[in-house]
Image (spheres, rainbow, N blue to C red):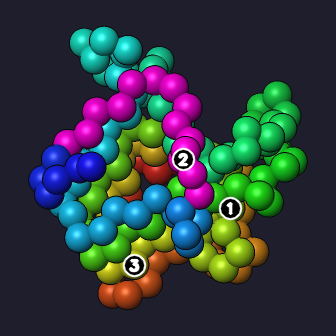
């Protein structure tokens, strides 16, 4: 588990929750945290375009994408990806794909605190309610530096 102030480096690959959390999201709660993707497997090089890091909500590994990743089937049984709660978080150099929620965001639900997104790609996230890519409430601040949706 990450401690307050930690920086987490993530190597290229696709990362899926091992179990669906109770509300469908992996929580980041009351932390100051940096998550940086795009590293080689030995962490000696960082290039998010070459070493693609994907956080996926496809917990059942059953999504089917078309060739250019603009359409998907099978994601209504997916989980939301992150719920940021009263935290200060920077996420840099990752793709958030295939998140699903019935009410709030399929990818990131920001509930209090600050979230800065740097060089991030959001694709094929779905919400039956508000915000397929992200939903912001609770006096939160969302900062964008190179966001692609």
Q: CA distance from mark 1 to mark 2?
A: 13 Å
Secondary element at tag 3: strand
- Residue sitting at 28 percent across and 33 percent down? 9
76 relative position to 57: left or right: right
Secondary element at tag 2: loop
| Res 79 quadrant in image | bottom right
Residue in front for this viewpoint, 62 or 35: 62
Hey, which residue is sitting farthest bottom in the picture?
Answer: 138
The mark total stands at: 3
Q: Which residue is mark 3?
A: 111
Residue 133 higher or lower than 95, as above or below: below
Q: CA distance from mark 3 to mark 1?
A: 17 Å
- Residue 106 percent coordinates (x, y): 62, 63
Q: Which residue is mark 2?
A: 17
62 relative position to 56: left or right: right
Q: Are marks 3 and 2 in contact (CB under 8 Å)?
A: no
| Res 41 quadrant in image | top left
Return the disc, 3 or 2, that comes first in the chain's sequence.
2
């Amino acid at each position: 588990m990450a401690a307050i102030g930690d920086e987490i480096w993530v190597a290229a690959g696709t990362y899926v929750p091992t179990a669906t959390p109770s509300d469908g999201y992996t929580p980041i709660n009351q932390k100051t945290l940096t998550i940086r993707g795009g590293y080689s497997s030995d962490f000696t090089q960082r290039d998010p375009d070459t070493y693609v890091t994907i956080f996926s909500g496809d917990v059942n590994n059953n999504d089917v994408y078309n060739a250019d990743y603009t359409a998907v089937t099978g994601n209504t049984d997916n989980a939301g990806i992150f719920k940021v709660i009263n935290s200060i978080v920077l996420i840099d150099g990752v793709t958030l794909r295939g998140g699903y929620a019935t009410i709030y965001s399929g990818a990131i639900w920001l509930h209090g605190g600050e979230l800065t997104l740097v060089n991030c790609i959001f694709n094929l996230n779905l919400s039956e309610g508000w915000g397929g890519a992200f939903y912001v409430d609770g006096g939160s601040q969302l900062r964008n530096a190179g966001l692609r949706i």
